[in-house]
Image: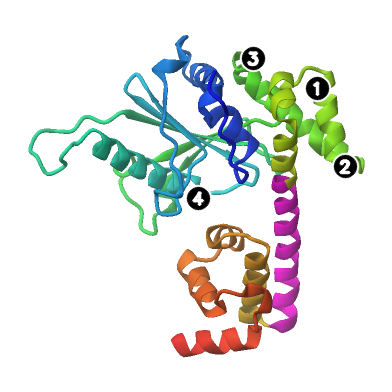
Amino acid sequence: MAEANIKHKDRVFRMLFGYEKYKENLLELFNALNDTAYTNPDDLEINTLDDVFYMKMKNDVSCIIDNRIAIYEHQSTWNYNMPLRGFRYTAELYNKFIMENDLDVYRRKMIKLPTPQYVVFYNGTERRAEKEILRLSDSFIMPCSEGEYEWTATVYNINDGHNKDLMNKCKIMQEYATMVAKIREFRQKGCDLDMAIEYCLLHDVLKEFLLEHKSEVADMLRMEYDEARTMNHLKEDYYEEGVKDGAMKAKVSLICRNLSAGITAEQIAEFMGEDISFVRKVCDAIGDNPSECDVDEVVRKLSKIE
C-alpha cells in the first residue's frame, strides 16, 4: 500500500477519503451514495484540485470512476454558497479533464464529459435536516425558468446518529462521525483532545488509521478546532466593534487580526458575509505586515481608493 503523503494544512476528512493510500475508503463512500458495488480501488482516479496549481482553488475530495466525476466537500459550518463553490470546482475539474485528454472545445464534435455528482457532508453544531438540496438558482438576482439554469449541492448531515442508512453502508464515515462526536464531548468536559483519541483507539473507532497517524491527526484536529474557536471569537469582536467604532473600522480591524492569525482572504470573506473583492482590497491596503496594521491609516487609504 502506498505511503500517505501528509500535508500539514489538510483536514482529517480529506486525509481519510482523499489520499491515495486510502482509496478504498473513497470507493466505499461512493458505493454507499450511489448503491453501486465497485470492488477495485484502482478503478477510481483521485483528481482533487490542489491550490498550488489551480489559482488558490482547492476542493476536499474528487474522483473519476466509470465516466462519473464525484466531488465531495466537508463543512463544519453551514454555508448557503456551497452550490456556487461546487459549480466553480466542477468547472475547474472539467478544465483539468479537457487539458489532460487533449480535447478541443472549439471543434464541431461534441465533447463527452463525466457525469457530475456534488455532495456536501455537514457536521456542524447547527441543527439541520438529514438531507437538504441547495440550489444555485436561489442565488440568482433575477428569477429564471425552473430548471433552465441549475446546479445543486446535496447536503448530508453526518453528525453522529444521523443518516443511519449511509453510515451503515460506509463504516469509515460512521467511525469518523463517532470520533467527531467524542471530541466534542470530551472538550465540553474540559478534557484534552488526546483523551478523545485514546477513547477512539480503545473502542476501535478509526483504530488502524489513528495508530498509524496519531500525532499527525492530533495536530490536524487541534488546528481545525483552534481555527474554529478563533474565527468565532473574532466574529464576536467584529459585532462588538461594529457598534463601538463604526462599521468600516470594525471590518478592517477584524481582517487585520484574521490575517495575523493565518486565515485566508477567502475564509474571511465567507464568515463575514463580505464580497471577496472587498476583502482583497482591504488586504492590499493592509500590506505585508497585518500584525502592525494601523486601522485608521488603512481606512484613509480605502476612502481614497473609493
Q: Amino acid at mark 2?
A: Gln
Q: How is the image coloured?
A: rainbow
Q: Earlier in the sequence, mark 3 or mark 1?
A: 3
Say which element carries label 2: helix
The residue identified by callout 2 is 188
Q: Earlier in the sequence, mark 2 or mark 4?
A: 4
Q: Which mark is residue 168?
A: 3
Whether residue 303 is situated above or below residue 234 in the rendered picture: below
The residue identified by callout 1 is 201
Secondary structure predominantly adopted by residues drawn in magenta: helix
From the viewer's perspective, is the residue at label 3 or at label 1 nearer? 1
Say which element carries label 4: loop
Q: Quadrant of residue 106?
A: top left
Q: Amino acid at mark 3?
A: Asn
Q: Which mark is residue 81?
A: 4
Disc 3 residue crowd, few under 14, some 14–19, many 20+, Cα 10 Å: few
Q: Earlier in the sequence, mark 4 or mark 1?
A: 4
